[in-house]
């Protein structure tokens, strides 16, 4: 791994064991991501793009999922062999992820404020007031109007596009070294897609 390589993934293989048999979701993906680089993983729907990224972050439910082989080295740490404690400190703070489906990625019973400020308080040691100010800045940055008022609303009060913007704000909150974007503009209109990209 070179000095400016942030993430090196080698031979990642993930399977799911189902009553119908084993699903070979990821079959030996390898890549390197350097500092300042943009890497696109391209493939048809269902080919394992999302599963690859979720495997790296330890978000695959085990069982039925199983990471059969491979490594994902980030700052000298193999994420595939790391315990949950280590991954919790890396997820959000060092590696952020914008999930594909904003409709199911936000907790419906928690306010946007609670969900946006959680990682700021946990990873950045901000108090409530600091985290709220930063959350408002983040909401403004992703184009959510009247963020101070909307901060206290719940996900069901936001359109799909607005929820996706909240997800983007959450992923950017702690200024992570790596941002994994799983189809981050799917729910947005063309004008906003260009702005977010």
Image (cartoon, rainbow, N blue to C red):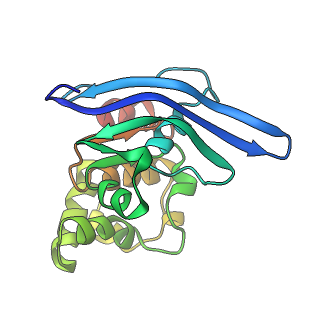
Q: Percent position (x, y) of residue 43?
A: 55, 20
Image quadrant for the N terminus? Answer: top left
Q: Residue furthest right?
A: 20
Vertical relation: 87 (above or below) 80? below
Q: Residue furthest bottom?
A: 128
Classify residue 15 as left or right of residue 56.
right
Q: How many labels does the image show?
A: 0
Vertical relation: 154 (above or below) 191? below
Q: Percent position (x, y) of residue 82?
A: 39, 53
Classify residue 159 as left or right of residue 133.
right
Q: Is residue 144 visible?
A: no
Image quadrant for the C terminus? Answer: top left
Q: Percent position (x, y) of residue 135?
A: 25, 64
What residue is at 82 percent from the left and 38 percent from the top?
Answer: 21
Give the quarter of the image for residue 179: top left
What residue is at 46 percent from the left and 37 percent from the top?
Answer: 182
Q: Is residue 76 visible?
A: yes
Of 18 and 174, nearer the camera is 18
What residue is at 42 percent from the left and 27 percent from the top?
Answer: 10
Of 53 and 21, nearer the camera is 21
What residue is at 49 percent from the left and 25 percent from the top?
Answer: 29
Q: Percent position (x, y) of residue 65?
A: 64, 47
Vertical relation: 193 (above or below) 154? above
Classify residue 70 as left or right of residue 15.
left
Q: Which residue lies furthest to the top in this view?
A: 43
């Amino acid at each position: 791994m070179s000095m400016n390589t942030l993430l090196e993934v080698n031979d990642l293989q993930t399977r799911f064991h189902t009553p119908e048999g084993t699903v070979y979701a990821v079959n030996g993906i390898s890549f390197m991501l350097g500092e300042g680089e943009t890497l696109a993983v391209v493939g048809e729907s269902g080919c394992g793009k999302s599963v690859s990224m979720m495997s790296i972050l330890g978000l695959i439910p085990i069982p039925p999922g199983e990471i059969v082989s491979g490594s994902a080295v980030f700052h000298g740490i193999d994420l595939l062999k790391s315990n949950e404690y280590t991954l919790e400190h890396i997820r959000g703070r060092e590696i952020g992820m914008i999930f594909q489906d904003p409709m199911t990625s936000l907790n419906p019973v928690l306010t946007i404020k609670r969900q946006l400020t959680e990682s700021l308080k946990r990873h950045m040691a901000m108090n409530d007031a600091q985290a709220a100010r930063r959350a408002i800045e983040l909401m403004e940055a992703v184009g959510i109007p009247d963020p101070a008022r909307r901060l206290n609303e719940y996900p069901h009060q936001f359109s799909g596009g607005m929820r996706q913007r909240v997800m983007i704000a959450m992923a950017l909150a702690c200024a992570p070294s790596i941002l994994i974007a799983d189809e981050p503009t799917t729910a947005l209109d063309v004008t906003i897609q260009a702005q977010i990209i």
